[in-house]
Every structure is written in structure tokens, then in C-alpha cells.
């Protein structure tokens, strides 16, 4: 199994006590499959993605990527796994401000040791063809989001974790990016777990899970 989470629990401590966010979340994602994750704002979707990416540690349960329990890796091991196997598209795009769009697009592929090809073609598909020499601060939010998606596509990860990757996009542009991510899954066998607030987009993926009261249904 590409990704498997079992009985994952996470609480956050605040001044007024402990707030459970995830109360025993289990899911599986096979290579080449696409899975939508829906749930109200504040239901814990981003928290779950951070845990799956090894950016935060669960209070209980296990997370395996390609059969490897990520709790058994040290920080360097988790970083190496993210660099070489996992593509993250977050609500904040985390572009590198000092690099052009073209260099941002190829950065993760280079980090992962991938041969970079098809940049111009991909940029055109993302509507970024005329912006390759701009810098992130010179782009709209939706354009920055498309750079973050393109960067992930070029790196060809085994697992894509995408947090509302179309949140800043109009319907047509959003659909085009979903097509791109689905194409990555079908062409390279990547697994895609995508958070979305859109029932329409969720219906475009192979399966769907809904997070409510800390549990998936
Ligand atoms: N570092 C933190 N410290 C304390 N509470 C946190 C922390 N991170 C998240 N939370 C809380 O955990 C809950 C889930 O947050 P999360 O960001 O996972 O929600 P979400 O489903 O991604 O929401 P949205 O759809 O708005 O992005 C929220 O109640 C949030 O306030
Ligand atoms: Mg979120």
C-alpha cells in the first residue's frame, strides 16, 4: 500500500485544555488512485495532511508510506522521504521568493534528483507560459497556487498530498489543474490525496472520505 494510516489521533493543547482533532482516523491509498478528503472548516483536514507528510507527530496510531512507518524515521529520514517520494501542495504555497517562476517550478524536481523536462509545456498548461521569468511576489494568489502545483507535477512524487489546491482558482482553471493531478496519477502511478470543499471536484476523484467530529466516513 502506498499510504496507510491506522487509528491516528491528534489533540492540540491550548490555555483552556486539550482539544481532540483526530480521534482514530484510518485510511488507505493505493498507487495510481485518487482520494478526496472533505470536511467542514476546522474539522482537521490540514492537521491530517501534516501528519501524513511527517511534518507533525500523531499522539497515537501509525502512518506508513510505501510500507515504512514514518515514526521510525528520524528528522533527516523524514525530510529525505518528503524530498524524494512525497509532493506537498499546501494552503500556503511556500514558493521561494528569490527564485523565478521557472526556477520555482523545477526546484523540487532537482532536489529529488529528477531529470527536468517539459517545463514550457507544463507552464503553458497551467497558464503560466508568459510568467516564467517573474518572481512569486509578482503573481496573483491563483498563479502562485498553479506554480506550487506545477512544481509538484514536475517532481513526479509517488504520493501527492494536496490541501485545497484549487482554493484560489476559478472553475475552469481549477478543473484543468485537477486534470493535471489526475493525469499524474494515471501516467506515473502516483497516489493523490486532495482536500477540497467542492462536492463537484470531490466527485471527479476515485473515492471520497469525509472528516467529521474527528473521524472519517
Ligand atoms: N498548532 C495548533 N495549535 C492549536 N490548535 C490547532 C493547531 N493547528 C490546528 N489547530 C486546531 O485544530 C482544528 C483543525 O484545524 P485544521 O487546520 O486541521 O482544519 P481544516 O479542516 O484544515 O480547516 P480549513 O478547511 O479551514 O482549512 C482547528 O480547530 C484548529 O483551530
Ligand atoms: Mg485546512
Image: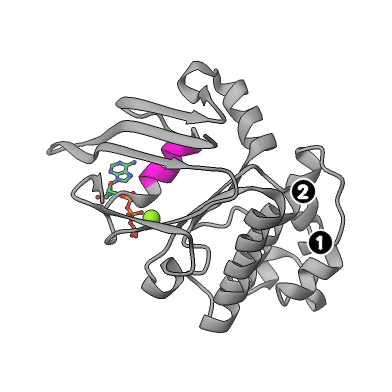
Image coordinates of residue 104 in percent, x first then y, are 75, 55
Q: Is residue 98 visible?
A: no
Q: Which mark is residue 102?
A: 1
Q: Nearer the viewer, residue 110 or 6?
A: 6
In the image, what residue occupies the spot 38% across and 41% down? Answer: 27
In the image, what residue occupies the spot 55% across and 75% down? Answer: 174
Q: Nearer the viewer, residue 114 or 168?
A: 114
Q: Which mark is residue 107?
A: 2
Q: Which residues are magenta?
A: 47-53
SS under mark 2: helix
SS under mark 1: helix
Q: Nearer the viewer, residue 96 or 60?
A: 60
In the image, what residue occupies the spot 60% across and 49% down? Answer: 32
**Circle 2 crowding by C-alpha within 10 Å: few under 14, some 14–19, many from 20:** many
Disc 1 and disc 2 in contact, CB within 8 angstroms: no
Q: Is residue 53 above or below residue 108?
A: above
Q: Nearer the viewer, residue 71 or 158?
A: 158
111 left or right, relative to 4: right
Amino acid at each position: 500500500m502506498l499510504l496507510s494510516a491506522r487509528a491516528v489521533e491528534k489533540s492540540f493543547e491550548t490555555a483552556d485544555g486539550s482539544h481532540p482533532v483526530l480521534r482514530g482516523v484510518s485510511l488507505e491509498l493505493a498507487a495510481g488512485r485518487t482520494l478526496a478528503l472533505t470536511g467542514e472548516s476546522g474539522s482537521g483536514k490540514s492537521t491530517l495532511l501534516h501528519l501524513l507528510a511527517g511534518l507533525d507527530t500523531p499522539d497515537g496510531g501509525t502512518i506508513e508510506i510505501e510500507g515504512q512507518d514514518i515514526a521510525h524515521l528520524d528528522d533527516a529520514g523524514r525530510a529525505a522521504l518528503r524530498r524524494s517520494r512525497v509532493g506537498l501542495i499546501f494552503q500556503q504555497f511556500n514558493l521561494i521568493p528569490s527564485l523565478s517562476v521557472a526556477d520555482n517550478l523545477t526546484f523540487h524536481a532537482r532536489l529529488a534528483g529528477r531529470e527536468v523536462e517539459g517545463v514550457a509545456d507544463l507552464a503553458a498548461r497551467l497558464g503560466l507560459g508568459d510568467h516564467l521569468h517573474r518572481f512569486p511576489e509578482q503573481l496573483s494568489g491563483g498563479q502562485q497556487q498553479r506554480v506550487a502545483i506545477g512544481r509538484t507535477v514536475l517532481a513526479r512524487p509517488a504520493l501527492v498530498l494536496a490541501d485545497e489546491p484549487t482554493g484560489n482558482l476559478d472553475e475552469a482553471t481549477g478543473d484543468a489543474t485537477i486534470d493535471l493531478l489526475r493525469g499524474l496519477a494515471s501516467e506515473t502511478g502516483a497516489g493523490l490525496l486532495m482536500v477540497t470543499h467542492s462536492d463537484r471536484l470531490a466527485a471527479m476523484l476515485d473515492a471520497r472520505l469525509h472528516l467529521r467530529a474527528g473521524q472519517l466516513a
